[in-house]
Image: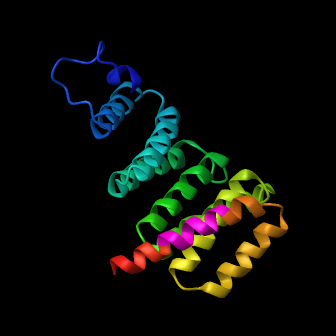
Amino acid sequence: VFREASPTQRQQGEPLTLAALLDAAERRIDTELVDDPLLQADLWDDLAETRAAAGNLERASVLVEKALAAKRAHLGADDLSLVESLVNRGAIANLAGDGERAVAALDEAAQILAKRGEEDSQRGTDLAVNRVHALLLLQRNEEAAAAAERAVRHGQAATVSAWLNDAMRLKLEHEQRL
């Protein structure tokens, strides 16, 4: 991606936009890494996060689904790598205002973490915060408050506080769009 951005490396006349760079990165992942589907999946997850942060939720969703499909085909059902993709799916659904889809993905991720005894890990924190956001989108406020309280009890107060502020801002933005 960075090589493509360099004026000395890119082809003359190519546009230098974030979208063009991300498109080029995606093409390279799709074509150059076919022999390593798990590396492809990890990079699709990373690119999904970047696309979501840039506001392209549709493309982010496609990428996270590709990552999930590859991981499900090559990993065990309780592999931690699936948690990353499921949390990404949930986060993208939250940004799109689809709380039901977010909760479904996050609950699946929570089951994997619970099986492995890793609910209190950083992955668990990311999951918990995204789940609170999804519950707020669904106006399941009491359940969201209980989930936030559990996360705070597990020592995740600063992260939960920051994410809750973001979640409330996003919820308000979503309501304004309706």
Pinpoint residue 50: horizontal percent, then vertical percent. Answer: 44, 45
Specify whether 26 is left or right of 140.
Answer: left
Colour scheme of the rendered structure: rainbow
Quadrant into which the N terminus falls = top left
Q: Name which quarter of the figure residue 116 lies in.
A: bottom right
Determine the residue positioned at 63% across, 48% down: 76
Pinpoint residue 150: horizontal percent, then vertical percent. Answer: 78, 72
Residue range in magenta is: 162-170
- Principal SS element in the magenta part? helix
Specify whether 7 is left or right of 40.
Answer: left
Furthest residue toward left = 13
Furthest residue toward top = 8
Quadrant into which the C terminus falls = bottom left
Depicted 129 relative to depicted 38: above or below: below
Depicted 152 relative to depicted 126: above or below: below
Determine the residue positioned at 65% across, 65% down: 129
User: How many marks do you count on the picture?
Assistant: 0
Pinpoint residue 96: horizontal percent, then vertical percent. Answer: 40, 67
Depicted 20 relative to depicted 102: above or below: above
Q: Name which quarter of the figure residue 26 lies in.
A: top left
Pinpoint residue 37: horizontal percent, then vertical percent. Answer: 47, 35
Determine the residue positioned at 54% across, 85% down: 139
Q: Name which quarter of the figure residue 164 lies in.
A: bottom right
Asked if one can make out residue 107 in the rendered structure from this viewpoint, the answer is no
Asked if one can make out residue 127 in the rendered structure from this viewpoint, the answer is yes
In the rendered structure, does residue 165 fall within the stretch colored magenta?
yes
